[in-house]
Amino acid sequence: MRGDNRDMTSPVNDDLARARSRFLRDRRAAAEFGRTVPLPIAGSWRRSAQAGVDATGDDTRQVTITSDTVLSRCARDPMNQLVRSLGSLDVGIVLSDEHSHVLARADCGRAATTLLNGIDLAPGFDFSEGFVGTNGVGTVIQTRMPIYVEGAAHFQERFLRYVCAGAPILHPITKRLEGVLDLTCDVRDASQMMQTVAVQTAHAIEQELLRAASPVERGLFDAFEEAVRSIPSGSRAAVLAATDLMTAHSDQARTLLTAAQRTELCAAAFRATEAHGRARFVFDVGGCDRPSQRSPASPAPAVGTVRTSTTLRISTVRFEREAAHGVLIWAEPMGAAANGGDLPDAQTSAEAGRHLSRPPTRASQKNGQQTAGLTHTAASSRAPRRRGLSQARPTQTPALVDDVSLSRGSRSNAWQLARRELGSSLRKGEATLLLGEIGVGKVSLVNEVAHAHRLHVHVVSAETIEHCTDLPAMLNALTHGGQNPLGDPVIVLRNVHLLPAHSRTQLERFLRAPRVHGDPGRIVLTAERVTGDDPSPLSALLPFIARTVIVPALRERRGDIPSIAQSLLDALQPGRGRRLSATALQTLADGHWPGNIHQLSDALRYAVEHRPAGLLTTDDLPPHAFSAALRPLTELARQERIAIITMLYRTGGNRSAAARELGISRATIYRRLAEYGLS
């Protein structure tokens, strides 16, 4: 159906359509819009044009998503309630995450299903403004404001027959943008009321997010805001808070600590407070250099950089109720007490934990106060479970894959070739670039080969590189930092294609410099393969790379999937002897894995959570694992098949209920099950 909408006539705003045509011919026409084009739409058109969006294009982009998230669970009831409220109106209700990736959709009426499938507005597709132009998902992500995009307000022609109304979903505690709730329909069925309905539904989802937060989370983040507000002006003290699912940190914490160091500090605070509920300790920062407010009399640091204090005094208190727990952390550089007073003592800290049921304040939003940066945590920063409640907890997917051997029983020539080439580079001390799709196990490959050559791997994330003030000095220190009992170092710079220009310039300076220490500097860069006509962000680095190694995608080593799955399963539940049935292994081997090994790991994590013990069967696998078909499918047919699988899972295999939810008849769903090999 894609492309048919251009030939269909529908009522449009003639003035808006003429303004759009003028803008596409000459961007300078935007200065003459006046009231014809709403400011949010005009701004979106400019951003779309600057991003290079083709107004006549119809490209789609699939992405790997995790459908069973806190947001999707909290949105399920409000979306279903809206479906019931709208009745037979042909409207699609769409949920996206903060990256404009569609997570879920609920359709009112059969026409809505056909309409939205025609533009691939379906789970697993990317609707970011920089890819498809002005729309009710990506433009809301850009502006954090509700928007009504009618017909000719869209940037791309394929959307001209559509109207969409989107509203942002903000976490009620952290104020983090979680995603978008969007209503989409044919322009002939549209009403300005759609924006009001979208906002109301987004608010309902926010209330579900608040209910999903534990009393500990609500009390902890209330105390965090109070603590941030109480920091004296000019103090170098930092405040952090962490629970199982999210963290918060003041601006000063971001200055003192990298993301990895914040994660490590939160984990240390959980351990220190487990026995007595509060603790004081000293935390060694280490790591790369940071800007600091050094007085002129203080000694100059080495290598021409300014280094903050490497030691922090920590005071922390534990928040706890039933199985939920969190920590509130005060941190200050050693010797900085004179600037901002002493850290609060443990008893004072404990006072913050008494009012766990208070509603969150809005103090952090006021002008003139330190703001809080709030993010979802990595799994490594989550609190360890209390004794007596111990349960195998999966590690965060990238960290899990990094530490798993992906070569056990491998029959893939492409994987073995990558191993041999990387091994040769490490022996020679060459700078090497590993290229591959997301989630193929590039760092795991380095770990395997380095271990075989008795080398020690040090992984540096793109975020750490970006925030390092003197990258060459840091890399030289890591490369030539003295003898390591674990072996000579291999420095892995992760996702260098994501680095901003200034960081790539620093990296180029390091790679260009001659080696004067005598011993080889083993540097491995990892990146995703860049496609399209845009110049590669790695082009300036390539002259200094001795070897490029291509890491194969999982679909190119399909015969290895059973052994890889078993290795991941052993890592997810060590020592448990978990196994997959033959049919489950075959299902995984036949599957389509655009997220590669990371997505396979997500599927296995889902399975072990669904069945904590015993043999894992196909009944335990998530819907996205069943992606193989008996015959080649068109894109639309493939999306329909995935939608049927997902709905059957949600309805517990009830085909009548699944048909009702999909807006099709029982006869149709039985026919589709046979056609798609699902009967």
Image (spheres, rainbow, N blue to C red):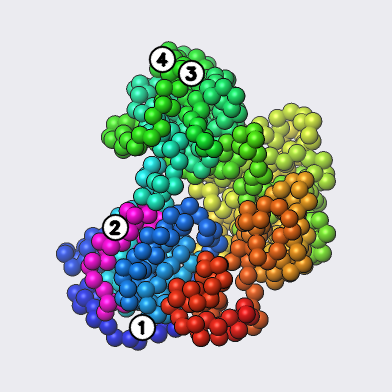
Residue 1: horizontal and vertical position, in percent? 44, 83
Q: Nearer the viewer, residue 453 or 392?
A: 392
Q: Which residue is disc 2 drawn over? A: 200
Tag 2 or tag 4, which sits nearer the N-term?
A: 2
| Residue 190 on the magenta span | yes
Q: Is residue 250 left or right of residue 274?
A: left
The amino acid marked with disc number 4 is: Gly
Q: Which residue is disc 1 drawn over? A: 6
Query: How many marks can you see?
Result: 4
Q: Which mark is residue 341?
A: 4
Q: Nearer the viewer, residue 545 or 418?
A: 418
Q: How would you rate the neighbour count of disc 1 (Cα within 10 Å): few for under 14, some for 14-19, many for 20 or more?
A: few
The amino acid marked with disc number 3 is: Ala
Residue 150: horizontal and vertical position, in percent? 27, 71
Q: Which mark is residue 256?
A: none
| Residue 272 on the magenta span | no
- Looking at the rendered structure, the secondary structure element under dot 2 is helix
Q: Is residue 633 above or below residue 486?
A: below
- Measured in 3D between alpha carbons, the distance from the residue under mark 3 to the one under mark 2, in whole angstroms, is 43 Å
Given this view, does label 1 or label 4 mark the residue nearer the observer? 4
- Looking at the rendered structure, the secondary structure element under dot 3 is helix
Given this view, does label 4 or label 2 mark the residue nearer the observer? 2
Contact, mark 3 vs mark 2 (Cβ under 8 Å): no
Instruction: Give the residue at x 70% y 69%.
Output: 587
Instruction: Give the residue at x 44% y 47%.
Output: 212
